Image: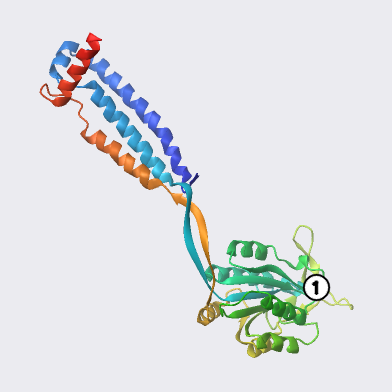
Amino acid sequence: MIWENSSYLWFLLLLPVIYGGYFWYKKYQIKKRSGYFDDRLINQLRKNYWKTGEKVRLISLTIAAALFIIALAGPKIGTEVREVQRKGVNLLVALDLSRSMNAEDVRPSRLDKAKFELNRLINRLQGDRVGLLVFTDEAFVQVPFTTDYSAFRMLLDISNTEQMPSSGTNFHSAIQLAKETFRNIDNTTNAANVLLFVADGENHGPSYQSVLRELINEGVTVFSVGIGTREGGPIPIYNQNGQISGYHRDAQGNTVTTRLGSESMEDIARQGGGEYYEIRAGSDNIEPFFSKLDELERGEFSTQEFADYKNQYQFLLFFGMLFFMVTLFFPDNINEKSILNRWLMRYQKNKVND
């Protein structure tokens, strides 16, 4: 059993307190009343009073309150089977993790801004399969195609420039691995294949033109996001405490300035049949890409049975209402001619004879 809102169960602790307070107040009333009236007079005035009926009503009210509180907590027991259909596109994100992505010409840094925008993108996805490819001089798949967006976010958040064995940038290796990744997925549903290429545009590897054409010929649409400014900025070096201890320098001792290479990023998107987006400030975003993604052909990836805990609060509410009805209508006084009174007298008489 699991609970949807288990914090409501704390209200159950109030019931014995209220129950005890009620009996204390009753004793207090009796004690105070005995100073003014004789018990025989009270019994005469309350001739048809039935003490057991009052107890039944009090117990029923307590049980009803307990059932309502437990129902409010949302108990879930057992499982129910539902059919889940996932429809969407195959979206592969290629993220540059070269050390130039640590530059702070886009606040808080190029990489942090890129991850922020990708998290916004994931929040907008509904049923799409998404994967994450990270690259520097080398490339590897950080997240295989999945619909588990929580896992994607977790592995995206831990991505950083220190995890890669080299610090350069090679577009050829990234696009080559993207091509192989799309080839390895089962795409019998005609869902659109999309590559979102996120980098600062600095490419120090061989030409990527031939492998890009191969990727496009296999039906992949390529969008690109260039992140950085044309003025550029230095590449920070961090110490063990995560604080900037200096900036990267060239062989002559000059501070290296990294700038946005928008030409190569525009070329990738133009050849890939997609669009190029540029982030040059912390307020920029890739909002137009969201609408473009909605226009692409969506396929049905899978129809599967999904087991989940079944909510059982309805039964608690039903029995709670029954006990509440007992509280409202159960008598606490008995007329001498009533059927209940005759039954009680017969019961007491048989008890005495036994």
10 Å neighbourhood of mark 1: few (<14), some, or many (≥20)?
some
Q: Nearer the viewer, residue 230 or 263?
A: 263
Q: What amino acid is at disc 1? A: Ser
Q: Which residue does the numbered mark 1 point to in the structure image?
A: 167
Could you tell me if residue 21 is visible in this image? yes
Please state the horizontal and vertical placement of residue 346, each as a whole percent of the image: 18, 17
Q: Nearer the viewer, residue 228 or 275?
A: 275
Check the picture and name the quadrant holding the C terminus: top left
Left or right, 332 with respect to 168, comes to left
Does residue 10 sit above or below 308 in this rendering? Answer: above
Q: Quadrant of residue 190?
A: bottom right
Q: How is the image coloured?
A: rainbow
Left or right, 36 with respect to 234, comes to left
Does residue 321 sit above or below 303 in this rendering? Answer: above
Outermost residue on the top side: it is: 353
Outermost residue on the left side: it is: 337
Q: Residue at x 49, y 64 (%)?
A: 84
Does residue 242 sit above or below 59 in this rendering? Answer: below
- Total labels: the figure holds 1
Q: Residue at x 39, y 46 (%)?
A: 313
Outermost residue on the front side: it is: 354
Q: Nearer the viewer, residue 16 or 245?
A: 16
Q: Quadrant of residue 327?
A: top left
Q: Nearer the viewer, residue 79 or 52?
A: 79
Left or right, 5 with respect to 121, comes to left
Does residue 86 sit above or below 315 in this rendering? Answer: below
Q: Residue at x 75, y 89 (%)?
A: 210
Q: Quadrant of residue 29?
A: top left
Please state the horizontal and vertical placement of residue 318, each as a whole percent of the image: 32, 43
Could you tell me if residue 227 is visible in this image? no
The secondary structure type at the circle numbered 1 is: loop
Please state the horizontal and vertical placement of residue 307, each as a whole percent of the image: 51, 55
